[in-house]
Each structure stands twice: as structure tokens, then as C-alpha cells.
Image: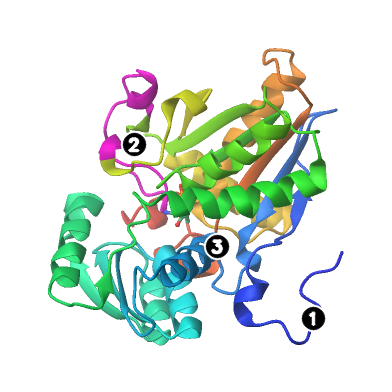
Amino acid sequence: MTRHTDPDASLLETIGNTPLVELDATPNDVSVYAKLETFNPGGSVKDRIGKHILERLLERGDVPPDGTIVEPTAGNTGIGMAIAATRLGLETVFVVPRGFSEEKERLMTALGAEIVHAPGDTGMGEAAEMAHEIADKRDDAIVPQQFETPLNVEAHYETTGREILDVLGEDIGAIVAGIGSGGTLMGIAQAVRERVPDVHVVAVEPSGSTFGELLNREPEEAPYKTEGIGTHDPDVTQLLDPDALDDVRTVSDRAAHAEVQRLAAEEGHLVGSSSGAASVAAREVAEEIAAGELDVPARTVVTVFPDGSDRYLSKNIYGSFDAWEGKA
Ligand code: PMP
């Protein structure tokens, strides 16, 4: 495998082309592959949109060459945008709701970003409003809004989705991925459907999140700990096309947490809770394919591990479930 062996490559060119590896704990005759997004320089899938969105905004002249990016983010998008901004000569201000991982905030600060806090109990809605208020006061600032810009989906259509096709060709039965903005899943699904029209597309959310309403389910709203996916307001993102989804599956915090620990102890993967949830759902789909309960065009399931566990150590991700939940 060749990965970034060009000594003249810039840091932004090392984003993407992440490894796709097969998981061990899968049923006979069905493969589950995970795209390992920790291999990006900022350690998450969001480096892809940071690079793509900022480069396009500069190209289009939507932000001046030394302008400012203001974005509501729980962290990974901030890190990805801050890396791109540093390389492209832009300033960054991030509006971060309270209660998310402290490590992410420290990384954004190290990358030169200014952090403004939004109240944690209001979801991303208030953070978005605050971001617009900040940007309105400056004449060089823009709010890219990852939950609204088609450039988010486009980043994954052009990179993540095509990379998966480059490795697996048409041997793809199902795509299973967590949804926050939905950019990752929508972009991959768009790219893969061009080659595999019947691929089964599954969104994953934590139990207690309410994206299921988009498929006319009646999810029960409750707090959850799994970080980076889910919502209590399905209208928060404009990127999710319900017609493009075959299913929305929920994974409990308890199952995601146990899977994070199993993936480390048994398979050597150091991943965050949204990866744990994606893995649980991907393995469930694989079991159903193996049992003949799900009709898919190939016996191969693809999922995404969006980030690593190191940024959740202060949240006790490798402690007991109660310690992770903050009850201990
Ligand atoms: N997992 C983690 C850890 C994330 O930070 C995000 C982005 N919020 C996601 C999954 C979901 O990605 P997307 O926004 O593309 O749906």
C-alpha cells in the first residue's frame, strides 16, 4: 500500500486515502470493512471537510485570502477547519457547546483558533446562532455551516466514497455510518450508488436521538453520551435526504461503549464512541446478511470509524460504563 510517500506533499495533501481494513468479529462469508479516519493529520474524518470547504470558499472568493472562518462545532470539525485554515492563511473562531470533550478544545486552541462557548443544553442550534452573530460583526468572516453546505457532502462524494470504490469496486452490499451532519454517509452513498445502485444504506444514531423521525419512526427522545452523532432536532441538518436512506438504526450508549472496549482489546482499534456505535450496527447488518434476512447486492459491509479514543480519555472511555456516563 502506498500512502503519502511524496516528500514534497504538503500537510493538506496527506488528508484522505485512509486505510480500509477488515474487522475480525464478523459472521462467516460476510466481510465488514472499516475506514480508519484517525489516519488523518487532525485525527478525524472532519479533516476532509475542513480542507475541501475552505479551499472551495477561497476559490470562489466567498472568504477573502486572510479572512475569518466562524463555525459552530463540537470539536472535530473545528480541528479539521483549523488545520486547513492554518495552512491557507485564514483565522478561525469556533462556537463550542459546553459538555463536549476537553481534548478537542485544547487541540483547536493549539491550532490558533479562538473558542467561544455556547450553553451545552441547547444543542447546536444556539451555537449556530451565536456563530452568525459573531460573523455579522466582521466584514471578512463567513460561517461555512457544515450542517447546511453541500460542500460537506461533496467532500465525501469526491474523496471517502471514491476511495472505497477504488478498493472494493462493485463488491459493496451495505454502507453503515453514524450521522451527525450526515455529510459522511450522504457523500459515500451518492458515490457508491453510481456504481452499485442497490447498495443498502444505513444511518446509525445513538438510542435517545431522533433522526429516526425522518423515516417516520417514533424514536423516544433521551439524553445520550455517544459523541459526534445523533440529535434531538432532526431539522438541525439540511444534508440528510430521507429518500437516500434504507434504514436508521439505533445503538445504545452501553453497546457502543462495550464495543469501543472490545475493538481495542480484541482487534487493536483505538476508536471513539461513534466508531463503537457504527461497528455494532455494521456487525448487526452483517449477521442479518449471513442469516439471509437482508437482501443486498454483495456480502460486504462498509463502515467508517470517524475518530480515535485518545481525545476521550478524560471522559473515561476505557473506564466502566458508569464512569464514562459520568455517574461514578
Ligand atoms: N463521529 C464523530 C466523532 C464526529 O465528530 C462526527 C461529526 N459530528 C460524526 C461521527 C458524524 O459525521 P457527519 O457529520 O459527517 O455525519
Q: Residue furthest front?
A: 60
Q: What secondary structure is found at the residue carrying circle 3?
A: helix
Secondary structure under badge 1?
A: loop
Q: CA distance from mark 3 to mark 2?
A: 25 Å
Residue 286 on image: x %, y %: 70, 28
Identity of the amino acid at label 3?
Answer: Arg
Q: Using a 10 Å C-alpha cutoff, classify the residue at mark 1 as few (fewer than 14 neighbours), some (14 to 19) or many (20 or more).
A: few
Residue 106 screen position, x and y as percent: 38, 80
Q: Quadrant of residue 239?
A: top left
Q: Specify the principal SS of the magenta part.
A: loop
Q: Is residue 38 left or right of residue 292?
A: left
Q: Which residue is mark 1?
A: 6
- Is 262 located above or below residue 186 in the figure? below
Local SS, label 2: loop
Q: Earlier in the sequence, mark 2 or mark 1?
A: 1
How many marks can you see? 3
Q: Is residue 66 above or below residue 274?
A: below
Label 3 or label 2, whichever comes before in sequence order: 3
Rendered image: mark on residue 209: 2
> CA gap, disc 1 to disc 3?
19 Å
Magenta region: 212-235
What amino acid type is highlighted by mark number 1?
Asp
Q: Is residue 229 magenta?
A: yes
Horizontal and vertical percent position of residue 92: 33, 78
Screen quadrant of the N terminus: bottom right
- Which residue is under mark 3? 48
Q: Residue at x 72, y 52 (%)?
A: 163
Q: Nearer the viewer, residue 122 or 296?
A: 296
